């Protein structure tokens, strides 16, 4: 919803990235809102360079791994096991 609560609002995308340090630097450069691990953003929030704008919202549990190419089957098995246990949240 838009600010008036009636009209749809679609954010304007300034950039996209899938690397956390790129996203962190973009947020510090005031390019918009990003979703970052709290541990990565903590120092910049404490220093006032970033502001936590949605404190009640969480992205949930996120598992990051290197690309699947060359990934050991045992690593894939552990990831699959963890994801099954995580369910939908």
Image: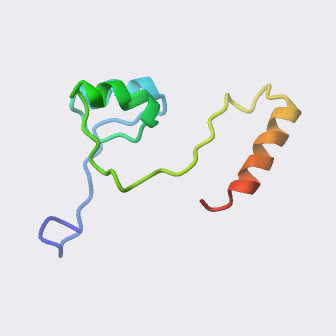
Q: Where is residue 33 in the image (x, y as percent from the top left)?
A: 29, 42
Give the number of marks: 0
Q: Going 44% across and 52% down the picture, which residue do you hit?
A: 58
Q: Position of residue 43 (x, y in %)?
A: 34, 24
Is the N terminus in the top left, top right, bottom left or bottom right quadrant?
bottom left
What is the quadrant of residue 34 in the picture?
top left
> Can residue 34 be seen?
yes
Q: Nearer the viewer, residue 43 or 67?
A: 43
Image-quadrant location for residue 35: top left
Q: Image point 26% across, 47% down: which residue?
A: 53
The quarter of the picture where residue 79 lies is: top right
| 51 to 72, vertically: above or below | below
Residue sitting at 66 percent across and 32 percent down? Answer: 65
Q: Give the answer, above or below, for where 59 lies relative to 44.
A: below
Relative to 86, say whether 20 is above or below: above
Q: In this view, does 71 lie to the left or right of 89?
A: right
Q: In which quarter of the image is the C terminus?
A: bottom right
């Amino acid at each position: 919803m838009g600010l008036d609560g009636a009209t749809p609002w679609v954010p304007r995308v300034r950039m996209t990235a899938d690397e956390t340090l790129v996203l962190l630097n973009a947020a510090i450069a005031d390019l918009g809102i990003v979703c970052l691990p709290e541990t990565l953003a903590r120092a910049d929030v404490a220093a006032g360079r970033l502001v936590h704008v949605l404190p009640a919202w969480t992205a949930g549990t996120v598992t990051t791994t290197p690309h699947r190419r060359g990934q050991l089957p045992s690593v894939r098995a552990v990831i699959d096991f963890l994801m099954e246990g995580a369910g939908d949240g």
